[in-house]
Amino acid sequence: MGATTGRFHMIAVAATVTVLFASATTVRADHLAEAAAGLAGTSVRGLVLDRPAWRAVIERVPEFERATGIRVELEIVAYEDVHDREVEAFRRGGSLTMAVVDLVWLGEFVEAGWLEPLDDLATAGASGVPGFDYGRFAPGMVDALARFDGTLWAVPFDAYAGVLFYDACRLRAAGLPGPPRTWDELKDVHGPRLTDPAAGRYAFAMASLRGEAQTTDSFLRMLAAFGGRLMDDDFRSALGTPEARAALAFRQALGAVMPPAVAGYDHAETLQALARREVAMVTEWSAFHDLLADPAESGLGDCLAVAPEPEGPAGRRPPIGGFALGVVAGASPKERAATRLFLQWATSSDLAQDFADAGGISANTNAYDGDADEAAAPLIAAVLSAWRRADPAFRPRIAAWPALSDAIADVGWRIQAGRTPIEAGLAELGGRIDAILAAEGYRDAGRRRGR
């Protein structure tokens, strides 16, 4: 991410939406006490993200501790440090009982044996916490954040999705009745009406900087919309297809309505371009809505609007992401039991409505009373639309993901920047993907594949 000012400077590489622990209906202390029988004095220890709303977890801890006698110790750390801190603790043993699991870490943690299976929590009536019902979590987010090789390993906690943020005033001034429904409409209809290079104004931008932004927010977003796949079911590159070529050709053509420097945009630069009204539309993570709505950071005001991402030839296939909470397999039996109880309490339906009221987005659908009304709650409607179309394998949740992401970021960026032709770039990237997967043993019988 380039140098930025204000709160934009605090945007993490992996975008997140935070969930505020507050509850209009307090979980009954007597039920918690009954569920925690024999666990008084046991400790739950975990890391939480360095986000203002996640700090609210600590504020709710005394309520849980009073009801259960369980001690909860949560350390606030930056996102960039969470993975390495957790891996070190899991290998050493004894220091953490709760795992914060990013979507792309799930396969790594499962393959290493660091998480305890939680299938029993999905059984109706299995929970000792009133209001906890695994069946109320959005199925697409359960598959993406918590299920790996058919087993549940975590509880969905902090969920988000790709959406289209746009400047409704600029669209109206250009005579456009609303946001584009398809990528072709964005490029061919909205694009020309909203682009004026001489004035430094463009129709659209998406984060494309070399790194995770290029991988997820640019390359994979286009690949999915056009029906392409990164790899097939046998863990071999699937990039030598007409769909993959069409996706990248379209992305190159889309450059005509994007800022010339868009290949250097991370999330901060993309959001700033919309906030400063240099572009009229961006595809970004739902997590950033509050930032764009903040008058101290954005000049959009009432012109800020949100819609589902456009559809491609394969339909609407936006990226999804988030975090789940898991139980560390290496903790003692009593610590695992206490941690399981804490996870259920923290993600229960009794808390979900207040998550939403506070501006967070919970994967617990009880917060939204079914489908959200698009006019009354456009952000929630766009996110729920994305979840219904969620592909858990949008970003492969395997231990080899960091190496795959680096390869995609390198070659994908060179293609977008015009330094490598599409055909040559796809051939190079396909070869690198095959080499990584073969070296990591993903074609070996019995290797966990995240299916």
Image: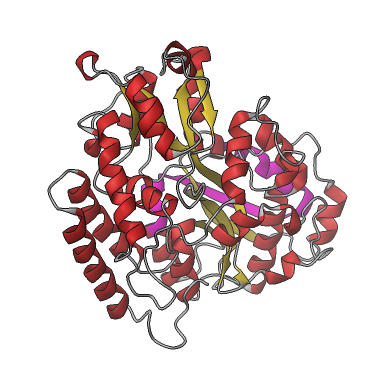
Vertical relation: 347 (above or below) 87: above
The residue under the point 65% across, 54% down is: 71
Magenta span has 68?
A: yes
The foreground one among 276 and 12 is: 276
Position of residue 170 relative to residue 234, above or below, is above
Residue 427 rendering spot, x and y as whole percentages = 21, 65
**Quarter of the rendering occupied by the N terminus:** top left
Q: Position of residue 384 (x, y in %)?
A: 62, 43
Residue visible at 23% across and 68% down?
A: 432
Please tell me whether residue 41 is drawn above or below residue 288 in the rendered image.
below
| Vertical side of 121 occupied by 299: above or below | above
**Magenta stretch mostly in which secondary structure?**
helix
Q: Residue at x 14, y 52 (%)?
A: 420
Left or right: 308 in relation to 335:
left
- For the point 61% across and 39% down, the residue is 361
Q: Which stretch appears magenta?
A: 55-83
Q: Quadrant of residue 87?
A: bottom left
Q: Nearer the viewer, residue 128 or 76?
A: 128
- Does 446 lie within the magenta span? no
